[in-house]
Amino acid sequence: MRKCLCATLLASILILATLAALPAAAARESESYSDSIIGQDREVLFQVSTIDALLLAVYDGILPVGELKERGDFGIGTFDRLEGEMIVVDGVCRQVKVDGKAYVVPDEATTPFATVTFFDHDEKVFVEKADNMTELGEILETSFPSENVFYAIRIDGTFPYVKTRSVPAQERPYPLLVDAVANQTVFEFENASGTVVGFWSPEFVDGINVPGYHLHFITEDRTAGGHILDLRVEGAEAELDLTPNIFMALPTAGDFFNLDLTGDLSSDLEKVEK
Amino acid sequence: MRKCLCATLLASILILATLAALPAAAARESESYSDSIIGQDREVLFQVSTIDALLLAVYDGILPVGELKERGDFGIGTFDRLEGEMIVVDGVCRQVKVDGKAYVVPDEATTPFATVTFFDHDEKVFVEKADNMTELGEILETSFPSENVFYAIRIDGTFPYVKTRSVPAQERPYPLLVDAVANQTVFEFENASGTVVGFWSPEFVDGINVPGYHLHFITEDRTAGGHILDLRVEGAEAELDLTPNIFMALPTAGDFFNLDLTGDLSSDLEKVEK
């Protein structure tokens, strides 16, 4: 009898082991679906709101950081009331405030504008020397197989120079972004070990996200950083994650709904980014 | 010893049973996530490629219709080699070819450009009288709570007049869309019962999708239709589905990759749509 019971248990184990394995099979099936052009869920650039809405002062946070992190472990953005610069790296979301310090952000904090993805590098590019953002950009672009898709960009290294900024929380009536960044605080780092985190987006997302590069920085000890205004790179390896899909979640209420988004704000964007 | 083994087996069973239950818990969690601004998966406009890529003759089908239908039961588009007009309504995908007839499309057929969503109306608008597309557009827009989100539009009714077109399959080297539609075939319907299927998109998707209205038509018996060039509406009810999210799946190979998408093609689009 006891032997029989054990045989039954063994059979049960086999059945349960099969059940436990089923989700893996289901996952594989959804992967085969995702082998299509839609790609795996990890190959989606997830974006909250639009850059033009941010330029036009839509600063109220609308998506909790806890939900943002379900859409990516890597990315950049800002926070409710435009307070500080967001850096998401290795699944941790941090906020560089105007005191120059990086704080781990609670899941309840909200963002009015952010872009994240799951980072899986497709290519590595060794950057021997780049004296500024323009040179770095040209070096990375030589490795882009297409200028019509998105790239998540991660560079871990020791940087001779990084210049960043952060922006204080704004009060209503909210000023335009171009006026809000006039009060930015600038930080300079020399021989700083850390991580560059950000994206390159194609020209056709003009008005929706930032065409070209949009990069933030966080130190290796994850205590400081900001939105990159300039940097020098020497002997660092850049990782690129080609991302052919974008999911844009627009606000369903608030200032966004009645905004006039038909204007060309590219000159404002130029001033804000540089 | 044997008892001990059985206890171990029982413990293993409990562990495996827990493992088997885990995916169900994960699924529930992702449902509560969808209550956020990102909305349910049904509230996503899913798009293959970009309208500017289509204007620049990227006509090779890249997504099977079977996979497109997993992303929506309602929408419009075209097919491999630009052959005919797509109408997806109530989960069935049909192709209006240049013979004027609508054919149910096999799941293996592919599309180079399409837009679909799951249609759940948020609002109904009674259209007493509209003598053309412009008048219809103005009437519907009075019900839009915002011009910064997407609307799926469905109108079932008997239409005094509908003018549609379809386009033949193209051969390589592919002509630009503005030249391909020069060979369009035009169809006119009088007092036709049927369904208008399409979308209104905000101005900021310029280059990505069609700003404003993009509507197709299919007769009530689902045997004919096409891309709407003009129509008259009398006493029909329009249903609007406000859609605040967009998922854009870009081609990961083919003509798209090396295309110059930086130009302004809005005048081409104007010619192609009207």
Image (tube, coloured by chain):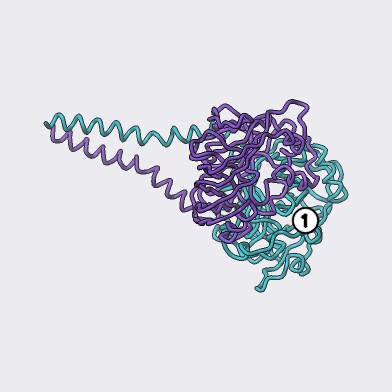
Chain colours: A purple, B cyan
Image point (25%, 30%), residue name: B11
- What quarter of the picture does the C terminus of chain B occupy? bottom right
Q: Secondary structure at mark 1?
A: strand
Image point (54%, 34%), residue name: A93
Image point (68%, 60%), residue name: B53
Residue B168 appears anywhere in the view: yes
- Classify residue B197 as left or right of residue A118: right
Q: Residue B256: horizontal and vertical position, in percent? A: 63, 62
Quarter residue B80 falls in: bottom right
Q: Residue B258: horizontal and vertical position, in percent? A: 63, 64
Q: Residue B10: horizontal and vertical position, in percent? A: 23, 31
- What quarter of the picture does the N terminus of chain B occupy? top left
Count all numbered tags in the image, as a single digit: 1
Q: Residue A236: horizontal and vertical position, in percent? A: 50, 52
Q: Where A214 falls versus A184 (above or below)? A: below
Residue type at mark 1? Ile
Residue in front for this viewpoint, B197 or A190: A190
**Which residue is labeled 1 in the image?**
B228
Residue in front for this viewpoint, A88 or B116: A88
Q: Label 1 lies in what chain?
A: B
**Tag 1: Cα neighbours inside 10 Å, few (<14), some, or many (≥20)?**
many
- Classify residue A17 as left or right of residue B197: left
- Classify residue B66 as left or right of residue B233: left
Residue B118 appears anywhere in the view: no
